[in-house]
Amino acid sequence: IQSNPILNIYYFCKIFFSSGCDPGLLLDWDFPGSDIKTLFSPDAEHCQHLCTQEASCLFWAHYHCFLKATPSGKPEKQNPKQGTTAGYSLKSCNPLPTPSLSKVYEDVDFPGADYRALFTADYQACQKACTEDPFCQFFTFINGNLTNLFVLRYKCHLKYSWSVARTPAVTAVADRISGFSRELQIIPSYQTECQQTLFPNINFPGSDIEVHQAGSPELCQVLCSAHPKCTYFSFVSNEFKCYLKNNPNTMAPKDGIGITSGLPSRSCPLRHVKMYEGVDFPNSDIRYFSLNVAESCENACTSDPNCQFYSFITTSRLCYLKRVITMPAPPKVMNLANVVSGFSLRNYFL
């Protein structure tokens, strides 16, 4: 699309009054206000896919990456803005477009989220190392042109963001049944058997690195297994809290009623296969409808490529399909000379 206000207004009106998939980008255009979340993206296409994966996002504007929504589903304001690109979620597209993350960004840094560093000859080798590392989602490479800090030349920083679906909240509700899509790929593995390493009524105190909501000790183990720094975990059942821990030197168990601790199972094919009765996964809804039983709700989630997990209300027989962002998302993006950043080429996130 040309950077022309008249053409932009025409294009805006065209998509404003139509429905269905619209992947177009509005160059030098903005939808001010109506922000629901601010993220960081290296370009407009990446921001568009973040909006598509964010359950409540309907449209967006890229300077950083402003995700937006209104009750009407339409932008309340729109105007030309030099250097900003705007557009719409791709949720209505069928099939759902797959993000392409092959592009690299010269003189762009993805600061933070580091978990491993090594030296490589060039950014291509750094991207290859990221692609071959199951935890790496994106990278930043410092090239050989850096003159003031020689010790940092050719350094490849591998970085992590969550590629597994995490439920933002978990609550106990009597008339709820919740679960996950049976197609949800958690951790790729070629092995078919896995020894459970869960320790009921045992707590591993201290060494916390992150705390998340989880519906069970098994789900907490999935989160620990997916995090490159997690060495063990503790799950507090009455709070649905999963404490990921990092201490490669010491693991000191203590008695803890209602706490289940365990080890990651990174060599095991972890998948969500259980329904959780009396458990609700609130928020993150993409759509809902009436069904008779929870099994039908699970089937509906499994058949919908955009659905990761669900909650079924037994009293009203309503099925809520849900999802969160799982594509690689740097915690920050900034301009920096003599670095190259990019993404893993695996693209197995859902």
Image: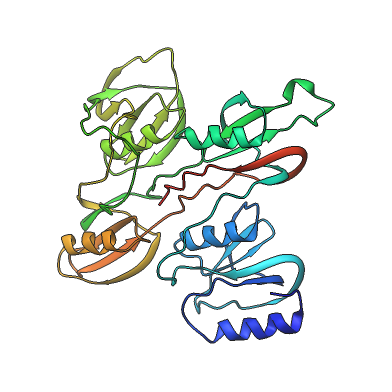
Could you tell me if residue 237 is visible in this image?
A: no
As drawn, is 69 to the left or to the right of 287? right
Residue that appears at 51% across and 44% down:
345
Residue that appears at 46% across and 53% down:
325
Please, is residue 24 above or below residue 19 in the view? above
Q: Give the farthest residue toward the top.
A: 249
Q: Quarter-wise, where is residue 128 in the image?
A: top right
Please, is residue 15 above or below residue 200 in the view? below
Colouring scheme, one of rainbow, by chain, secondary structure, one colour: rainbow
Residue that appears at 46% across and 27% down:
229
Please, is residue 252 above or below residue 182 in the view? above
Residue that appears at 73% across and 75% down:
2
Residue 178, percent from left and from top: 25, 54
As drawn, is 201 to the left or to the right of 98? left
As drawn, is 269 to the left or to the right of 97? left
Q: Give the farthest residue toward the right.
A: 148
Residue 49, percent from left and from top: 52, 60
Please, is residue 56 above or below residue 178 in the view? below
Q: Quarter-wise, where is residue 12 in the image?
A: bottom right
The quarter of the rendered structure image containing the N terminus is bottom right
Residue 276, percent from left and from top: 21, 49
Residue 297, percent from left and from top: 22, 63
Q: Nearer the viewer, residue 261 or 151?
A: 151
Could you tell me if residue 147 is visible in this image?
A: yes
